[in-house]
Image: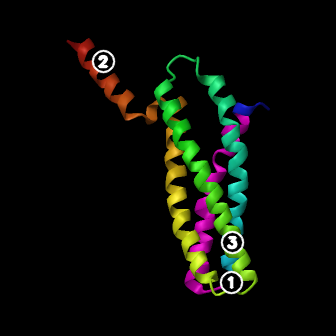
Amino acid sequence: MDGAHLHLILNHFPIVGTLVGLGVLAYGLIIKDLSVKKAGLGTLAVMAILALPAYFSGEEAEEAVEHLPGISDAVIHEHEELAEKAILMMAFLGGLSLLSLYAIWKNKTIAKTSTIITFVFGLLTFGVFAKVGNLGGKIRHTELSTDIQKHDDVKKEYEED
């Protein structure tokens, strides 16, 4: 298995896993259950770790497709630029998750506040990672790109005339 395959396998974890972690954390906040909160925070911390190989295998994935016909350098560049921001956000989210877990474990008064802050920042991080994933999908799945679809529609109209 090369880096491109690894990237394609792992890139779903930071997106789906973060959404699952946020769902568990939200449930824990609603029912005020520390065990459920800890499970959500732990999931977010694990997703921060799993995001690293997904991110670092991206360069090899780029090298595997950048010379193929129909691949947009602009989409690759946009995906890469946003991924750089997303991985920093995910690292911060992992840190916040660990801080919140520690605060819960030590029964600190900041535990509730840090957990809510972690949840809110997790929502933002998920949104950025979802956008990164969407852009990544457009690299090889041109049917997802509205710009390409518009180009094909114009091309069809031109050919009909």
User: Count the marks: how many?
Assistant: 3
Residue 13 appears in the rendering: yes
Which residue position holds label 1? 34
Which residue position holds label 3? 99
Task: Residue at 53% x, 30% y: name it.
Answer: 76
First in sequence: mark 3 vs mark 2: 3
Task: Residue at 67% x, 74% y: name it.
Answer: 100
The verdict on residue 9 being magenta is yes
Q: Quadrant of residue 114?
A: bottom right
Of 142 and 28, nearer the camera is 28
The verdict on residue 8 being magenta is yes
**C-alpha gap between disc 3 and disc 2:** 55 Å
Task: Residue at 58% x, 43% y: name it.
Answer: 84
The quarter in which the N terminus is drawn is top right
Of 36 and 44, nearer the camera is 44
**C-alpha gap between disc 3 and disc 1:** 14 Å
